[in-house]
Amino acid sequence: MAQLLKTIDEYVTNVRKKTTMWIVFNTIYNDVHAFNKKLNPNELNKYLKKEYTDLEEQKNFLDFMSTEFPDTVIEQVFDLASANYLMYPYLGSYVIDTNIGSDVYNALAEKYGDPYQDPVKNNAVLWVIEYEEAQKFHKDREEMVDSEF
């Protein structure tokens, strides 16, 4: 079933309007983008598939946030993907509405690894996107959609 969610770049561009952190639980996405793993031809069909999302780790994150930081807004978002992908599944990721250096940021960086450093495990990776970078990705996506329709 299709979901109407914002992409991370859309959320940052239109809602937060500043550098933003999100967390990805999809192991294949993280392998490719965080660990720079090249997928061989037999693995290409695994890319952007929700069945490679670690639902247990996602639940642990949601439980942690509701217990430790219940006032922090977290929202489901689509991950960064090439603007060539007009449709792809929700991979279980959440944007975290907190500032870099905040108590929430520091607790999550301690628990999952600093998003400005190499990740430690592929089933829960913290990412940071700069506002200007998000704007560029969002503009590219809008232009791609406009050219298709």
Image: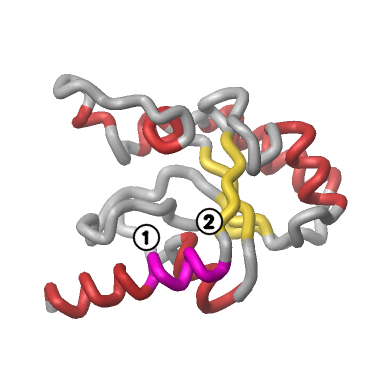
SS category of the residue bearing label 2 = strand
Q: Residues within 10 Å of mark 1 (few under 14, many from 20)?
A: few
The spot of residue 38 in percent (x, y) is 29, 26
Amino acid type at mark 2 = Gln
Q: What segment is highlighted magenta in the picture?
A: 131-138
Report, in whole angstroms, how far the alpha carbon at label 1 lies from the one at label 2: 10 Å
Q: Main secondary structure of the magenta part?
A: helix
Tell me whether the residue at label 1 lies in contact with that at label 2, contact meaning CB atoms closer than 8 angstroms: yes
Rendered residue at 30%/75% (across/down): 142
In which quarter of the view is residue 61 placed?
Answer: top right
Q: Closer to us: mark 1 or mark 2?
A: 2
Q: Is residue 2 above or below residue 138?
A: above
In which quarter of the view is residue 12 placed?
Answer: bottom right
In-front residue for pair 23/61: 23
* Mark earlier in primary sequence (1, 2): 1
The spot of residue 84 in percent (x, y) is 21, 58
The spot of residue 20 in percent (x, y) is 63, 60
Q: Which residue bears the numbered disc 1?
A: 3
SS category of the residue bearing label 1 = loop
Q: Is residue 80 above or below residue 60?
A: below
Does 83 lie within the magenta span? no
Question: Residue 76's mark?
Answer: 2
Rendered residue at 60%/75% (across/down): 17
Question: Residue 44's mark?
Answer: none
In which quarter of the view is residue 86 placed?
Answer: bottom left
